């Protein structure tokens, strides 16, 4: 979406009434409401005016709950409750946000945008089922439930690649919002918020600290002009079952996409183990390095074999 000095103020002001409506409905405090004044147009600018109705519907149907827990980094989670709807299934969507009074303005932005971006990229083709299981799509991965009792079983291994691409898109949305400050913004509240955001970022491009190691390893993939736009489009539209074949066809070897996700999972689990271990930490680091090198080898092979990269 192209924004100019002639349309920026009307574009931002357009969503004030909508944000006031959902804030009153969900009883959001002013801190959350003022952030949403910029976050909602940031999402529309990212995904385009053609998807505006879709974006607004997501914010309208996904409630933010503030938990009693307090965390200076501000962890937040996108959650859903699986419900039966006649012969089919649906979900109730919500985001849990820890207490944020001591958190930085940018971290609060990051956490809310990160979780809503999961939500936005999970609505299309969200729920599917067969005789045994119900699958709820979360971006690139699935939450698997037992169809008999609707109990949660596990999350598919693509969850770590999902976090990598979601982190990159979170950065893009924050950078879009930060760019609003390049114009003469008439609304004083917007101006103040953009001023704080710009001072905290202290640079032209925002870099999130979420999933930093995984994002670092996958940087080549995220910059690849075949992989990133294609996977982003399929993820947004909900056609993620096509991704493994797309990836494997470029590599020329079946199972490459599955292996890539398996390595990301192993690295993450080892990172958790490392953080909790008192002994043998070097041994754990060596395993992380081995898996990281193997992962980077697959990524570079994909990148080298792409015609358009």
Image (cartoon, rainbow, N blue to C red):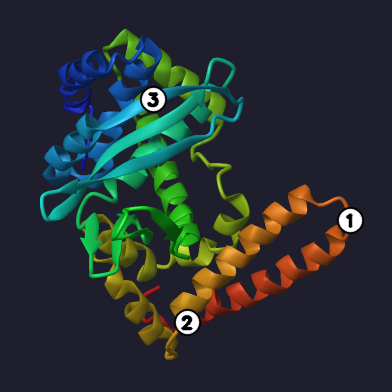
Provide residue 218's location: percent of width, then percent of height. Answer: 53, 63
Element type where label 1 sits in the image: loop
Distance from Cα at disc 3 to Cα at disc 1: 39 Å
Q: Are marks 2 and 1 in contact (CB under 8 Å)?
A: no
Residue depth check, mark 2 versus mark 3: number of the one nearer the observer? 3
Provide residue 97's location: percent of width, then percent of height. Answer: 46, 28
Q: As drawn, is 276 to the left or to the right of 250?
A: right
Query: Quadrant of the image for the C terminus?
Result: bottom left
Disc 3: which residue: 65
Residue depth check, mark 2 versus mark 1: number of the one nearer the observer? 1
Is 307 situated above or below 232? below
Is 13 situated above or below 262? above
Q: Earlier in the sequence, mark 2 or mark 3?
A: 3
User: What mark, if any, has residue 256 been given in the picture?
Assistant: 2
Provide residue 124's location: percent of width, then percent of height. Answer: 20, 54
Q: Residue at x 52, y 73 (%)?
A: 260
Residue 18 can be seen, yes or no: yes
Query: Quadrant of the image for the N terminus?
Result: top left
**Residue that extends furthest to the bottom in the rendered view of this protein:** 252
Disc 1: which residue: 279
Instruction: Using a 10 Å C-alpha cutoff, classify the residue at mark 3 as few (fewer than 14 neighbours), some (14 to 19) or many (20 or more).
Output: some
Is 210 situated above or below 21? below
For the residue pair 245 and 51, the one nearer the viewer reads as 245
Element type where label 3 sits in the image: strand
Q: Are marks 2 and 3 in contact (CB under 8 Å)?
A: no
Residue 303 can be seen, yes or no: no
Q: Tally the marks.
A: 3
């Amino acid at each position: 979406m192209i924004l100019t000095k002639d349309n920026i103020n009307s574009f931002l002001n357009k969503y004030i009434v909508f944000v006031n409506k959902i804030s009153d409905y969900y009883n959001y405090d002013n801190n959350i409401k003022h952030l949403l004044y910029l976050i909602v147009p940031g999402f529309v600018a990212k995904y385009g005016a053609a998807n505006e109705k879709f974006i607004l519907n997501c914010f309208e149907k996904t409630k933010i709950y503030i938990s009693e827990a307090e965390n200076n980094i501000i962890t937040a989670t996108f959650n859903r409750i699986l419900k039966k709807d006649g012969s089919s299934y649906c979900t109730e969507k919500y985001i849990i946000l820890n207490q944020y009074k001591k958190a930085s303005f940018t971290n609060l932005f990051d956490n809310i945008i990160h979780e809503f971006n999961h939500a936005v990229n999970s609505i299309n083709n969200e729920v599917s089922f067969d005789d045994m299981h119900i699958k709820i799509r979360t971006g690139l991965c699935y939450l698997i439930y037992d169809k008999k009792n609707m109990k949660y079983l596990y999350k598919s291994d693509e969850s770590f690649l999902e976090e990598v691409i979601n982190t990159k898109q979170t950065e893009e949305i924050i950078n879009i919002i930060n760019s609003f400050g390049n114009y003469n913004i008439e609304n004083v509240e917007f101006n103040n918020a953009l001023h704080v955001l710009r001072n905290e970022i202290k640079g032209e491009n925002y870099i999130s600290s979420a999933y930093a190691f995984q994002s670092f390893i996958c940087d080549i993939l995220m910059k690849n002009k075949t992989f990133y736009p294609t996977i982003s489009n399929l993820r947004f539209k909900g056609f993620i079952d096509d991704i493994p074949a797309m990836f494997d066809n470029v590599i020329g070897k079946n199972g490459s996409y599955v292996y890539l996700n398996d390595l990301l999972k192993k690295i993450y689990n080892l990172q958790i183990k490392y953080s909790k271990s008192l002994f043998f930490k070097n041994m754990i680091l060596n395993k992380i390095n081995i898996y990281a090198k193997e992962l980077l080898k697959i990524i570079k092979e994909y990148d080298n074999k792409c015609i358009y990269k």
